[in-house]
Image (cartoon, helix red, strand yellow):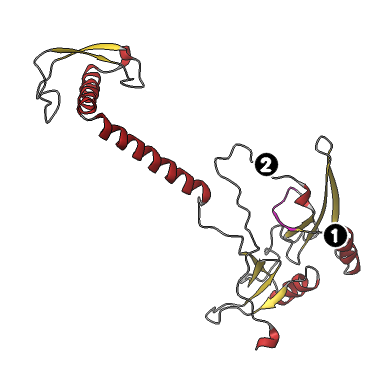
Amino acid sequence: MAVVTLFPSPRILNPPLFLPPLKQITVNTPLHSTPLHSTPPFQFIAVALLHMEQQHIADQNPTAVNNEIQANNEESQETKRKQEEHPLPLMALNHVSRVCKNVKDSVHFYTKVLGFVLIERPQSFDFEGAWLFNYGVGIHLMQSEEDDDSVGVRGSDKDHLDPMDNHISFQCEDMEAMEERLKELGVKYMRRTLEEEEKGETIEQLFFNDPDGFMIEICNCENLKLVPAGSSGKIRLPAGRHNPPLELNDEK
């Protein structure tokens, strides 16, 4: 609570408020977030005048003021609710792009090792490449214009495997079957097991490279519980897996 002596003048506010030449008012609501002793006099007086005018309006028509406050609160809550429900109009990961040294070799790898399906791509593209799709995500391959071993993330060292490197990861429901497939196809891989003793969770991971040294992970990470860690947003899980329109071969 503060008692404020007001000296209304056109030099203080423009347009001026028509107040008595001298008046003392008691302000019950906070005037400013800054302590009174550090508030500039001009700003303090202006804020006090504004509070007095609002209080005068409220005394004249309290019902209208309360209705306006309630409407503003409801509008603010509705806006917040919509933002929480739909923060962004995003649906799912659409595709991952890879620049490769040889498109045909990469297509063979992704179709034989990972079971992707070669699909048509826009005819307007004027560069060599290929589109593949499966498991709700696409892989877009683009032919490199370079003719040496600079293509890829590790240059000529295509066999290097480090789980700390950049990679894409695929969810797997049968890790043993996937490991057997890698063995049959002669793909060099690394297997790692992570134990979360406190939570009683076990994560199995397989790491291997594509023909250009881009690392791929296969894991059973659905065993991990999704727990937000300080983010203001909410995790959105689609009700059904999003897929583009599908044209089956027998429909052509």
Looking at the image, is 250 positioned above or below residue 107?
below
Q: Earlier in the sequence, mark 1 or mark 2?
A: 1
Q: Amino acid at mark 1?
A: Asp
Magenta residue check for 154: no
| CB within 8 Å, label 1 to label 2 | no
Looking at the image, is 23 positioned above or below residue 141?
above
Q: Residue furthest front?
A: 63
Q: Position of residue 106 (x, y in %)?
A: 73, 72
Q: Secondary structure at mark 1?
A: loop
Q: Position of residue 42 (x, y in %)?
A: 21, 20
Label 2: few (<14), some or many (≥20) within 10 Å? Answer: few
Residue ID for mark 2: 227
**Which quarter shows the C terminus?**
bottom right
At 13% from the left and 15% from the top, the residue drawn is 7
Query: The magenta stretch spans which residues?
Result: 164-170
Q: Secondary structure at mark 2?
A: loop
Identify which residue, 187 or 20, lies in the foreground: 20
Q: Amino acid at mark 2?
A: Val
Q: Could you say which quadrant of the image residue 6 lies in?
A: top left
Identify which residue, 73 or 213, lies in the foreground: 73
Residue ID for mark 1: 174
At 26% from the left and 18% from the top, the residue drawn is 40
At 81% from the left and 34% from the top, the residue drawn is 198
**Side (left or right) of 205 relative to 36:** right
